[in-house]
Amino acid sequence: MSGRAQLMWDEAVTGYDFGPDHPMDPVRLSLTRGLVGAFGLDQVVDVVSAKPAGESTLRLVHREDYIEAVKAASADPGAADGAYGLGTADDPAFAGMHEVSALIAGQSVAAAEAVWGGEVAHAVNFAGGLHHAMPGAASGFCVYNDASLAIARLLELGATRVAYVDVDVHHGDGVQAAFWEDPRVLTISMHEHPRTLFPQTGWPEETGAACAEGSAVNVALPAGTGDAGWLRAFHAVVPELIADFRPQVLVTQHGADTHFEDPLAHLAVSVDAQRAVQVACHELAHSYAEGRWVALGGGGYAVVDVVPRSWTHLVGVVAGRPVLPEAVIPEGWRREVFARTRQLAPGRMTDGRWPVGYLAWEGGYDPADRVDQAVVAVRRAVFPLRGLLA
């Protein structure tokens, strides 16, 4: 296996554009790519593009009638069929929607192929992570579910154990649904509690179909959870399950919308804690998956202050050249941000919380603490199904 990492990038992914009033502003992608370049990370990874996912690949997850509906809406946005989740406030139809959605999916599938084939150890597609799309419907700003398609391609290539870890603030419902009945895929989602956030799924009791019990894991955290609680929950659940499952490939989704500045959610996590989880995922891949790691982006709607920094950290971790939290952001990138958005860019790669501390679960828990209650709930729901002590 090559030790070199791969960054999937094609400028055309910025065409994934729901319009000027939609929170998923594609400028977040181009600004991230610019910051990656400003730190020279594009010199230590292979920057490659891939072809759009073809229909046979899309059908690994999506129904044929849904693909046809997306193509029809792409050709004529005014004819979008709401029965397929298209033409809605969350997923407005736009010209070329099928083509650019398939392109993003193709990047994630190619990343998975490169990692499985041993061409690279790690691959990252920060334009991906569109985890809400269902087999037969668009949902939550997501048209094609590139994360599910990457996993399905790995299974098609012969993988028998794939772990998916999703730390977006929203439940990774589309990926869970795609593999609900498949014990070869372990899906772990750590998200804001469904009582307070879309898509109102991801309860601890959702543990997989009868034929795959314990293959779905949901850590539902209370609104307001900050760095220490978020990291405590991650380390209380994810490493033990990954160690038990021993995946052949680790696929992770790194939505940046857990951040305290994100306008669409209610967690209070810093870029520093997001970076800490990225590092932890890297270590898990090397400890239990022979280093095979596919990392994806996801949500994130503080498009200047948060997303570019978080995903540039992700690229640095994937590349084996992590950006120091205290690093000063290059002035040229900050000027580009102001020129494009008329917003002032942040000055450093940290929120001033590095190093981020948390209390290890092994030291005991507080039954009155809401984060600890969330951890206990998921451990009791899932761990016995996997033969582990709750």
Image: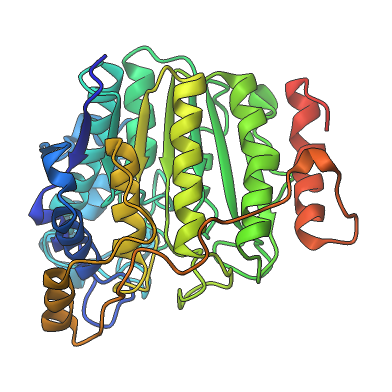
Question: Who's the residue at 48% across and 31% down the image?
Answer: 283
Residue 28 as seen in the image, left or right of residue 245: left
Return the x and y of residue 96 as percentages of the image width and height: 11, 59
Question: Looking at the picture, does residue 37 appear above or below residue 316?
Answer: below
Question: Who's the residue at 42% across and 50% down the image?
Answer: 254
Residue 191 as seen in the image, left or right of residue 282: right
How is the structure coloured here?
Answer: rainbow
Can residue 196 be seen from the camera position used here? yes
Work out whether residue 311 or residue 135 is closer to the camera in this orientation and state it: 311
Return the x and y of residue 386 as percentages of the image width and height: 73, 23
Total count of labels: 0
Question: Looking at the picture, does residue 289 appear above or below residue 278?
Answer: above
Question: Who's the residue at 36% across and 48% down the image?
Answer: 129
Question: Looking at the picture, does residue 349 appear above or below residue 298?
Answer: below
Question: Who's the residue at 48% across and 69% down the image?
Answer: 352
Work out whether residue 194 or residue 2 is closer to the camera in this orientation and state it: 2
- Residue projecting furthest to the bottom: 342
Return the x and y of residue 70 as percentages of the image width and height: 23, 54
Residue 335 as seen in the image, left or right of residue 347: left
Can residue 62 be seen from the camera position used here? no
Q: Quadrant of residue 307?
A: bottom left
Return the x and y of residue 18 as percentages of the image width and height: 24, 71
Q: Quadrant of the C terminus?
A: top right
Q: Quadrant of the N terminus?
A: top left
